Image (cartoon, coloured by chain):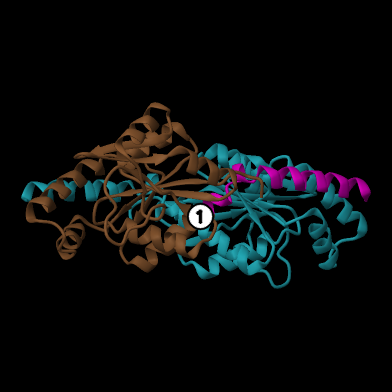
Chain colours: A brown, B cyan
Amino acid sequence: MAEKGCLFIVSGFAGAGKGTVTKQLVKEDPDIRLSISATTRDMRKGEAEGVDYFYISKESFEQKIKEGELLEYAKYGENYYGTPRSYVEQVLGEGKDVLLEIEVQGASKVKAAFPETIRIFVTPPSAKELKRRLVGRGRDSAEDIARRLSRAAEEAGEMGEYDYLLINDTIDQCVKDLHAIVAAERMKAKKQEDFISMIKEQLEETSKGE
Amino acid sequence: MAEKGCLFIVSGFAGAGKGTVTKQLVKEDPDIRLSISATTRDMRKGEAEGVDYFYISKESFEQKIKEGELLEYAKYGENYYGTPRSYVEQVLGEGKDVLLEIEVQGASKVKAAFPETIRIFVTPPSAKELKRRLVGRGRDSAEDIARRLSRAAEEAGEMGEYDYLLINDTIDQCVKDLHAIVAAERMKAKKQEDFISMIKEQLEETSKGE
């Protein structure tokens, strides 16, 4: 199909499981690609260039910012993280879908640049469950957990701006639900203008031929 | 859930298979109901009151028109067909979804009355295939088929107004695709305002409690 792909953003509370769910989706669906972010932080053990991140220097990152080469970016501590525009545009142009996993502020910036972006917010079924998961993964100190929960309370104010709310109760169901959203968006009439023109023409010819 | 249900309209070319697909969907999903039309035509063998249609007199049909009790109606030959408003409103109010199978003109009228209506257009993959199916079902004369194809050519002009295009290549895949649309629409953030308020409150309490 010559039609452009769909751009999906997945955001959600830390601990909501969005990483697990999006990774599973792209594994199962060859027509959607996970966008790879650029970062200035060092590569960690087990990571690979162009798989986990594009690892670039601070200078080239700042150059990219200047040139408008990043759809969105943020600085955490000393390190930049951002979404390269060229990769996203290239994949969409090939008629494949792209999925960005980014936080709420970045999502608004991408939406402004690509108004047809479809935004999905992943949330656990309750705040209690979110806390249970944050404690359960054993990565964060009590202080970190408190900070994440207070961040989540702030982010919740933005949930209503998203197109879809994906309640992550079990991973399997959540992946299925995400597939349903992706499938439905591909069926949007505005994504099938080529098909509409084709069948219109065919029908006119067929009905004249009768 | 106290949230109102979604209203779906399925339209499509005669011979596109929309009847088969919608019947299968409602069989598999207990949370969606097929709306039952009212008609003034006689009950046919094998049909049942309240299953195929609500069979009413011409006088009560015209009374319902006057009272605004029909979301849309049309007259074919001597007979009226229409969608009772009260049934649709009642089911939506119970938080269940409603599916109407109606033609293009009726769909615009319902959309005007319920702006949140989700419209789905069912089409075979090509005009050739549509003709093959019309011929294959052996119901129509050559003249009828010519008329249906010319009607389809006209209706094709409205396809772009629909939200979704459902290409019916095989019934099984088409039913799956329709499930995906229904599932996705239920996940729309605007259909989950109660959930958003709930988790917002919970998160505020949980993060205060830390």
The residue that appears at 12% across and 51% down in the rendered structure is A144
The residue that appears at 67% across and 69% down in the rendered structure is B47
Indicate whether B56 appears above or below B48: above
Quarter of the image holding residue A83?
Answer: top left
A187 falls in the magenta region: yes
**From the viewer's perspective, is B189 left or right of A142?**
right
**From the viewer's perspective, is B172 left or right of A206?**
left
The residue that appears at 74% across and 44% down in the rendered structure is B156
**From the viewer's perspective, is A186 left or right of A115?**
right
Chain letter of mark 1 equals: A
Q: Amino acid at mark 1?
A: Ile
Quarter of the image holding residue A102?
Answer: top left
Q: Can residue A173 be seen at all in this image of the molecule?
A: yes
Dominant SS of magenta comes to helix
Indicate whether B31 appears above or below B190: below
Seen from the viewer's position, the closer of residues A96 and A41 is: A41
Counting labels gives 1
Quarter of the image holding residue A126?
Answer: bottom left
Disc 1 crowd rating (10 Å Cα; few below 14, some 14-19, many 20+) is many
Q: Position of residue A32 (x, y in %)?
A: 50, 55
**From the viewer's perspective, is A116 left or right of A55?**
right
Magenta highlight range: A184-210
Q: Position of residue A196 (x, y in %)?
A: 71, 45
Q: Position of residue B16 (x, y in %)?
A: 72, 58
Q: Position of residue B100 (x, y in %)?
A: 58, 53
Q: Secondary structure at mark 1?
A: strand
Question: What residue did someone put label 1 on?
Answer: A32
Seen from the viewer's position, the closer of residues A57 and B24 is: A57
Q: Name, please, the residue furthest toward the top.
A: A66
